[in-house]
Structures are given as structure tokens and as C-alpha cells.
Image (cartoon, rainbow, N blue to C red):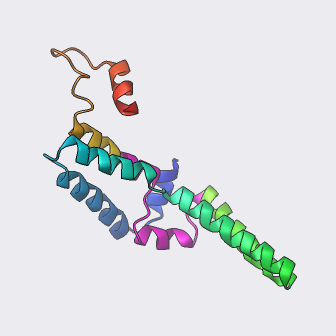
């Protein structure tokens, strides 16, 4: 099972629906917009952090904080990195840990949710217009080149 499936399966259906609706609304906003505006949004998407990056950064910051506090004050602070690493292990094996629902509620998306919006915007921008020529079959080389744009 992929990371996206695990995270989505462990996210409240209302939250998944809201994220999916937000993707659709964003794409609809760009219908008929100039390519430069669509490119601006694609550039924003390419800088967006997915749930994995947010969780990893959050976990490492909390773990380092706990180690620092343990070194400066008392070893009891080592409980913080132990708990955080346990959560990270849960996420790695199950696709869920206590911070996931919080991050998902504030709109942190999976990589494939981000890529779904990016792909739709690239389609609107016309990146795939040259893939089918004169009714010819889909060219895999042309598709891959369009996806790299």
C-alpha cells in the first residue's frame, strides 16, 4: 500500500473530501487563465511540502529539542525524542500517527494529491497538446517529456 493510500485511509473522510474539493476548485479557477498564471501556480505547488516532509521535519525538530533539553537540564527530557520516534515509527508502518490528523485538518496534502493538481494544471496549460498528433496513438516519449516540463 502506498504512502498516499495509508494517509488517506487514516484521514477522516470529511478532511479527504475537503482536500479533494480544494484541488478541484483551484483547478477550475485556472480554466481559461493565461499560461503564465498557471505556471505561477505550478511553481507554488513545486515548493509545497507534503505530509511526509512536514512530519519528518516536525519529528526531527522535537527530537533534537528533547536531546538538547536532556543535555542541558535532566535526562527525563529524553522521553520527548522517544515518544516522537515512536510516532514516526507508527507513521512509517501504519500511515498514521497523532500529528497526521492535525496536519491534514490544516490542509497538508500527500505528494500524490499535490501531483494531481499539478498534472491537471499542466493539462490546462497545454503541456500535453502535442502528445496525440493526427489521431495517432499516444507517444510515451512525448508524454514523459510533457510531464518533465
Could you tell me residue 149's position as x and y percent? 36, 33
Residue 79 sits in quarter: bottom right
Q: Nearer the viewer, residue 70 or 38?
A: 38
**For this view, does 72 lie left or right of residue 97?**
right
Residue found at x 50% / y 56% = 6
| Residue positioned 55% across, 64% down in the render | 96
Q: Is residue 86 visible?
A: no
Of 1 and 70, the residue lying toward us: 70
Would you identify the image quadrant in which residue 25 lies? bottom left
Task: Indicate the position of residue 147 as horizontal and vertical percent values.
Answer: 37, 32
Task: Indicate yes or no whether the magenta region holds residue 2.
Answer: no
Residue 73 placed where, x, y %?
Answer: 85, 85
Task: Give the side of residue 82 with respect to residue 24, left or right.
Answer: right
Nearest the eye: 74 or 140: 74
Q: Classify 33 as above or below 17.
A: above
Residue 6 in sight in this render: yes
Indicate the position of residue 37 as horizontal and vertical percent values: 24, 48
Give whichever of 84, 9 is nearer the camera. Answer: 84
Relative to 115, does residue 25 appear above or below in the rendering?
below
96 in magenta: yes
Residue segment shown in magenta: 94-115
Q: Is residue 75 depicted above or below 123 in this figure?
A: below
Amino acid at each position: 500500500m502506498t504512502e498516499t493510500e495509508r494517509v488517506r485511509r487514516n484521514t477522516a473522510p470529511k478532511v479527504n473530501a475537503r482536500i479533494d474539493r480544494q484541488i478541484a476548485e483551484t483547478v477550475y479557477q485556472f480554466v481559461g487563465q493565461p499560461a503564465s498564471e498557471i505556471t505561477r501556480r505550478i511553481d507554488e505547488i513545486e515548493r509545497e511540502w507534503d505530509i511526509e516532509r512536514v512530519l519528518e521535519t516536525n519529528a526531527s525538530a522535537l527530537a533534537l529539542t528533547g536531546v538538547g533539553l536532556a543535555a542541558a537540564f535532566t535526562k527525563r527530557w529524553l522521553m520527548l525524542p522517544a515518544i516522537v520516534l515512536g510516532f514516526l515509527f507508527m507513521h512509517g508502518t501504519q500511515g498514521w500517527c497523532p500529528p497526521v490528523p492535525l496536519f491534514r485538518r490544516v490542509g497538508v496534502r500527500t505528494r500524490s494529491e499535490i501531483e494531481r493538481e499539478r498534472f491537471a494544471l499542466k493539462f490546462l496549460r497545454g503541456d500535453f497538446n502535442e502528445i496525440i498528433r493526427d489521431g495517432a496513438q499516444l507517444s510515451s516519449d512525448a508524454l514523459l517529456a510533457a510531464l518533465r516540463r
